[in-house]
């Protein structure tokens, strides 16, 4: 295997493994830090990845080396915001200057800055993700080619060097974007499945599984604090008539509005759940029986005044059935 393919394969391995680590670190940081902190960390991590790729440079076999430092910069421009891109570019530029200040270093700095502008403009103007990547890499590689021609000491263009760089950057860029797309979709699906496992999809309230966990936790809590605990069991009267008469879409609207009232009027520590159908529960922490009864009556009156009630007659029924409109 030639030095180019060995170096390129090593760079791809470093790039792919780093992206997996990057996504995991960013996910953990975003859970505990503010958005601006996450943005800064994202820029720093991307810049460090660019530096690592510069360290593992690819030998082209023509007494010159290339690297994929531009890929992390493209990724943050594609998926991030201005601040992350600027931090990434800044770190790469600083590291390049630390390697030596000469004509080639200034050429590299110009290449990074022009590519940064290109990546940002393309990410804003080209909506299709893969088309945007192709345009980004084509323009960036063209800039690299022009600068190489301008700053080559013997004024001759090394065709093999440029060919190797175009191949490595395009393949590396598309592989990196594919991995990021895969990781992003996997993370989204994981969040959705995790949310569905604990949340009622219609109302957004806790489902019966979350209720069981919350109730067990509440029982453990009162053993330690000895505070009163109350549980309201809430049911919508004649709800079947709503579905039979107005249809399930209207029935779902009633359930969602009903759930919103419960959620809006619960205490900070209280837990409201949809346990199934038109059955709801409300766990009231530090609430005795008397206060729970008042709370229940308050909710009943609020719900009664929040829905228009009219009498309807079902064709197959011999009597009027009250339901919510």
Image (cartoon, rainbow, N blue to C red):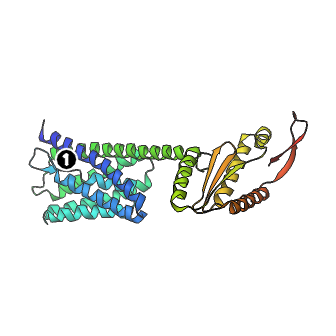
- The part of the image, by quadrant, that contains residue 83 is bottom left
At 32% from the left and 53% from the top, the residue drawn is 74
Q: Position of residue 304 (x, y in %)?
A: 78, 56
Q: Quadrant of the N terminus?
A: top left
- The part of the image, by quadrant, that contains residue 110 is bottom left
Residue designated by label 1:
162
Regarding residue 235, the answer to whether it shows in the image is: yes
Q: Is residue 244 left or right of residue 73?
A: right
Asked if residue 134 is positioned above or below residue 81 in the image, the reply reads above
Asked if residue 71 is positioned above or below residue 264 in the image, the reply reads above
Q: Is residue 201 left or right of residue 50?
A: right
Q: Position of residue 245 (x, y in %)?
A: 80, 40
Q: Nearer the viewer, residue 79 or 139?
A: 79
Q: Is residue 260 left or right of residue 27?
A: right
Regarding residue 113, the answer to whether it shows in the image is: no
Q: Tag 1's secondary structure?
A: helix
Q: Nearer the viewer, residue 1 or 321?
A: 321
Q: Nearer the viewer, residue 260 or 72?
A: 260
Q: Position of residue 160 (x, y in %)?
A: 15, 43
Q: Is residue 249 left or right of residue 53?
A: right
Q: Nearer the viewer, residue 231 or 64?
A: 231
- The part of the image, by quadrant, that contains residue 92 is bottom left
At 28% from the left and 51% from the top, the residue drawn is 71
Assess disc 1: are there few (<14), some (14-19) or many (≥20) residues with their C-alpha within 10 Å of its C-alpha: some
Asked if residue 33 is positioned above or below residue 176 in the image, the reply reads below
At 85% from the left and 50% from the top, the residue drawn is 310
């Amino acid at each position: 295997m030639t030095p180019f393919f060995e170096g390129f394969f090593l760079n791809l391995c470093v790039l792919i493994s780093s992206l997996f680590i990057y996504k995991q670190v960013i996910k953990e940081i975003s859970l505990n830090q503010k958005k601006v902190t996450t943005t800064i960390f994202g820029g720093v991590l991307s810049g460090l990845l660019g530096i690592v790729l510069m360290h593992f440079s690819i030998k082209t076999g023509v007494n010159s080396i290339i690297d994929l430092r531009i890929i992390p910069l493209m990724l943050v421009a594609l998926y991030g915001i201005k601040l992350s891109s600027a931090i990434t570019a800044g770190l790469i530029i600083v590291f390049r200057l630390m390697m030596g200040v000469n004509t080639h270093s200034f050429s590299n700095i110009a290449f990074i800055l022009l590519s940064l502008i290109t990546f940002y403009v393309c990410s804003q103007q080209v909506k299709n993700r893969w088309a945007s990547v192709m345009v980004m890499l084509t323009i960036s590689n063209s800039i690299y080619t022009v600068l190489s021609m301008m700053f080559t000491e013997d004024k001759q263009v090394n065709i093999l060097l440029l060919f190797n760089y175009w191949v490595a950057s395009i393949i590396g860029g598309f592989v990196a974007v594919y991995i990021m797309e895969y990781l992003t979709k996997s993370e989204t699906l994981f969040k959705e499945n995790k949310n569905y496992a604990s949340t009622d999809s219609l109302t957004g309230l806790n489902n019966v599984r979350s209720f069981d966990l919350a109730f067990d936790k509440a029982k453990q809590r009162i053993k330690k604090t000895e505070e009163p605990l109350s549980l309201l069991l809430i049911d919508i009267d004649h709800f079947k008539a709503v579905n039979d008469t107005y249809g399930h879409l209207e029935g779902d609207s009633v359930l969602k509005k009903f759930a919103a009232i419960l959620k809006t009027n619960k205490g900070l520590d209280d837990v409201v759940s949809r346990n199934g159908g038109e059955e709801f529960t409300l766990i009231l922490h530090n609430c005795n029986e008397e206060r729970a009864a008042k709370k229940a009556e308050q909710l009943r009156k609020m719900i009664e005044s929040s829905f228009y009630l009219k009498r309807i007659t079902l064709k197959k029924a011999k009597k009027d059935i009250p339901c919510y409109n």
